[in-house]
Image (cartoon, helix red, strand yellow):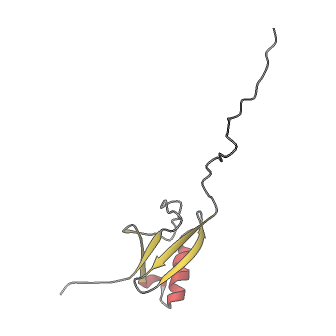
Amino acid sequence: MSEEQHDVKPDLQADEKPVIKSDTHLNIKVTDGNSEIFFKIKRSTPLKRLMEAFAKRQGKSLESIRFLSEGDRINGEQTPEDLDLEDGDVIEAHQEQTGGFF
C-alpha cells in the first residue's frame, strides 16, 4: 500500500481575481469648513503626521485644532487602520474652543 499526496489548489476562473485588501495608501480629505486638503497616507502611519501637516499648511498650531472622524476625536497615535478608514474618507478639523458659559 502506498499513499499518494495530491496538492489541491482552488479552482479560479480565468476572469476571477482574488480579493486583496490594499495595504498601501489611502486618499484622505481633511476639511475645516473653509478649505479641503487631500493627503495620501499609508494605512499603518500614525495620523499625527497628517494632523501636523494640515496644521502647518493652515498656519495654525496643532494644539489649536481638533480632528474628528465620524464624530469621534482622533488621537495622533491612531492609524487609518485603527479607525477603519477607507479610501476617500473625510476627517473634520475644528478650532479648539474653551469655555462656553455666560
> Where does the image place residue 69, in percent across and percent down from the top left?
42, 68
Image quarter of residue 38: bottom right
Horizontally, residue 34 falls left or right of residue 1, namely: left
Q: Position of residue 26 (x, y in %)?
A: 58, 67
Q: Toward the viewer: 64 or 5?
A: 5
The residue lying furthest to the front in this view is 15
Q: Is residue 47 left or right of residue 13?
A: left
* Residue occupying the far left of the picture: 102
Q: Residue at x 48, y 77 (%)?
A: 30
Labels in figure, total: 0
Q: Is residue 13 above or below residue 94?
A: above
Please name whichever residue, 73 or 9, is drawn nearer the observer in this view of the structure: 9
Which quarter of the image is occupied by the C terminus?
bottom left
Residue 81 at x, y percent in the picture: 53, 60
* Residue pictured at 39% horizontal, 83% vertical: 33
Q: In which quadrant of the rendered image does the N terminus lie?
A: top right
Q: Tell me the quarter of the picture where residue 50 sits.
A: bottom right
At 71% across and 33% down in the image, what residue appears?
9
Spot occupied by residue 96 in the image (x, y as percentages of width and height): 37, 83
In front here: 76 or 44? Answer: 44
